[in-house]
Image: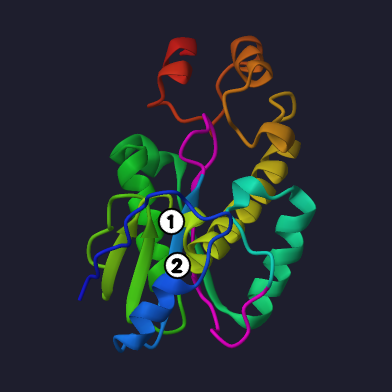
Amino acid sequence: MPVAPPAIGILPDMPDYSVERMLHAGGAREVAGVDEAGRGPLAGPVTAAAVVLDANALPSGINDSKKLGPKARVRLLKEIMACASVSVAHASVEEIDKLNILHASLLAMKRAVAGLRRTPCHALIDGNVVPGCLGCDATALVKGDARSLSIAAASILAKVTRDRIMEDLAREFPGYGWERNAGYPTKAHRRALANLGVTPHHRRSFKTVQEVL
């Protein structure tokens, strides 16, 4: 059954494993943290990850991916993948334009949970909306990547994976700076969009892209 998330209050300096331990104590053997990366960019897919950490082998230094540098994220990615059950999934640009970014993000999260080797007993979802038909109980945690180690771990996997996708796309479509901005609407990206035009990887449902079209 869903659990009532702890009151937000003042966020901790680092995420911890307290929500997961509470769920374990209630009988949930496997708890997955779920997060996404790429809701704000003008280009590229939205990527989600689901992570089931081993309570007896928690990597140290896990934090919200936004608070970590690139080297720390890559190091933690390797450590997480070595000791946890993980799954990464995406929703395409076409799906984003068809569904809208919120529903595409929820679809990517659902796919990430479905990709785990076993369906978890409970999923902790970053944000305030739980995707439908997950196949398990779930709880939405606002600012969950700052509160839950499992969600923070998922944020790292989603961020690193998506950044690598955008680096690959940058080689195919040079000039937009995707290797640096990951598709976000920086001044350089918006200028390139105006000068070079819209690529197949731009989200046509986004206002900034629509204005160029």
Q: Which of marks 1 and 2 is nearer the N terminus?
A: 2
Where residue 193 sits, quadrant-wise, is top right
For the point 69% across and 50% down, which residue is it?
68
**Label number found at residue 33:** 2
In the image, what residue type sits under mark 1? Gly
- Do labels 1 and 2 touch, CB within 8 Å? yes
**Horizontal side of residue 98 vs 34, given as left or right:** left
Main SS, magenta residues: loop
Tag count in the figure? 2
Q: Position of residue 155 (x, y in %)?
A: 54, 56
Q: Quadrant of the N terminus?
A: bottom left
Residue in the foreground of this view, choosing between 30 and 111: 30
For the point 64% across and 47% down, which residue is it?
67
Is residue 2 visible in the rendered image? The answer is: yes
The residue stretch that appears in magenta: 38-59
Kindly state the secondary structure of the residue where label 2 is placed. strand
**Residue 186 highlighted magenta (yes or no):** no
**Residue 49 highlighted magenta (yes or no):** yes
**Label number found at residue 144:** 1
Where residue 93 sits, quadrant-wise, is top left
**Label number found at residue 158:** none
Q: Position of residue 53 (x, y in %)?
A: 53, 78
Farthest residue toward the right?
71
Select label 1 or label 2 by which is in front. Answer: 1
